[in-house]
Amino acid sequence: MTRHWKPLVAGIAMGAGLGAGAILMVRGIRGEDRPREISAAAGRHLFDAVRARITRSWVDTISEDEMYRRAAMGLIAELGDAGTEYLTPQRVARLQESATGTYSGVGMSLSSRAGIVVVTHVRVGTPAERAGIAIGDRLLEVDGKSMRGWTVGEALGAIRGPAGTRVSLTIERNATTARIPLQLERDEIHVTSVTRARLLGTGVGYFLLSAFNDSTAADVARTVDSLTSVGARRFVMDLRGNPGGVLNQGVDVADLFLGAGQRIASTKGRLPEANAEFVDRTAERWAGRPLVVLVNANTASSAEIVAGALQDNDRALIVGLRTYGKGSAQHVLRLEDGGAIKLTGARWYTPLGRSLEHTTTAEDEVGAAEDSARHAVKTRRGRVLMGGGGVQPDIVAGDSVLSAAERAWVRAVGDRVSDFRRALTASAQRNAAAARRDGPLFTVTQAMRDALYNEMRARGLTVQRGVFDDARATIDLVLGQELAVVAFGIPGAQQRATLTDPVVSLAVELLEGVETADALFERANAGRSRPRPTASGI
């Protein structure tokens, strides 16, 4: 695969700091009054004149250092590019953590319920598991400090720290009031990109890919191999809600499912090194196995590269909603203050030349008409695909529009969502034992709904009973998921979410019994007239 330019979101390259000569700001000038061109000399004069007058006459005092900082931030903002931004040193660290999928801590997920921090998941092989921490444990103290009333962010900030250092926790075990003191040594924790994987239906392997870090392709290969070993012969790759991440990992994931020599994507930019073709290097790993890819409006960036490549090459059936349209590539340039600029340097295109970039304004539409390849293209099978931003699914499934009953429910709750969430958690805790009796696929009963409604009223959140009852589908969805988290932790909630998801059920229905990608497309074409399930919620 030819890779002259590496637009890695995680990559950190040293760059020069911003100086006065690079700062040309006319932020107050808009519309027709804004000059289209200005010489460098005139720009420097304008900047110096504005700076001098602010220093001398502005009502408040501002240091010269702060003035330069604000000018630099303004220059970035004036580019009008959502992908270009300044990153503080703290954000650089978080970006690096996200890109590598690694952090220093103890290996557990938390939530805050009624002012109590509760463990919702414990990662295998981590300090938390070795210490015997379990789902449902309540965290009372960290290093001798009470954690009552803490947010999840505050708790994570106190528990995480450099690998090799120690942290003291006091926990309260579920169903007992005994206080258990623990000493844990922090370690490097790696978070896999694949957050759900299971066998569904007859030989259908399902996996959810939540983000792209620097080990995503390896995680996917390991997951699909594992599903294959237990009988999976056809697959569902769930990219819904995946915001992307390390862009080249999107190329590598597509590489796993395509054959040698097939095009994956291309980039186009102003600089020669920003123009590149990405072509599959290896033989297809799971040759011909039918594949459905699920997408929605929050599928972006690297995830769109995967969906677009597999769709253009007739390798996968895309099901869901049109993707976000994040078709630009950024590289990260480190600055002397420890921060960085995330700077757009190119745009991505699918193998057939479709742009992944979504444009939103009339000015954008005119400027990008040719560049965004808004024409129709045909695949090898003769399928017609449209360009112009994002990936349009082959089969639309899922509903992004609320029903009348749901709109009435949302209006009734209004700005008291936090009160509703507290009532939801309290009612789930009261009914957790009933849910545990039937496992993660328990049925939400009328008694459970009544408990939630009573908890809402106890908190002064008054909603007409008719409005509440009419929104039963939405109530059952959110109450069922909260009950699953409380009763079974994140793994149980994930199992419930997967097995009750109508879009996943549609994917399984499409895959049942088919043995080749061609057979999958033929089934999809034959069934286009059938009504499709929708999914919605608050």
Image (cartoon, rainbow, N blue to C red):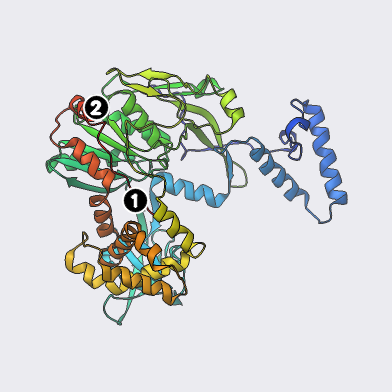
Label 2, secondary structure: give it: helix
Q: What is the crowding at mark 1: few (fewer than 14 residues within 10 Å), some, or many (at least 20)?
A: some
Task: Estimate how packed mark 2 is, as few (under 14), some (14 to 19) or many (20 or more) residues with alpha carbons within 10 Å.
Answer: few
Question: Where does residue 198 sit, x and y in percent of width and height?
Answer: 20, 47
- Label 2 or label 1, whichever lies nearer to me, is 2
Q: Amino acid at mark 2?
A: Asn
Residue drawn at x 38%, y 31% as measured from the top left: 392
Taking 65 as reference, is 304 above or below it? above
x, y (%) of residue 481?
Answer: 31, 60
In the rendered view, would you say 348 is above or below 322?
Answer: above
Count of labels shown?
2
Q: Secondary structure at mark 1?
A: loop
Residue 16 rendering spot, x and y as whole percentages? 63, 36
Q: Which mark is residue 430?
A: none
**Quarter assignment of residue 233:** top left
Q: Residue at position x 54%, y 37% from top?
A: 83
Q: CA distance from mark 2 to mark 1?
A: 38 Å
Residue 132 visible from this viewpoint: no
Q: Is residue 391 above or below residue 505?
A: above
For the residue marked with disc 1, what is the amino acid?
Val
Rendering quarter of residue 117 = bottom left
Q: Residue at x 25, y 52 (%)?
A: 500
Q: x, y (%) of residue 181? A: 33, 77
**Can you identify the residue that label 2 sits on?**
525
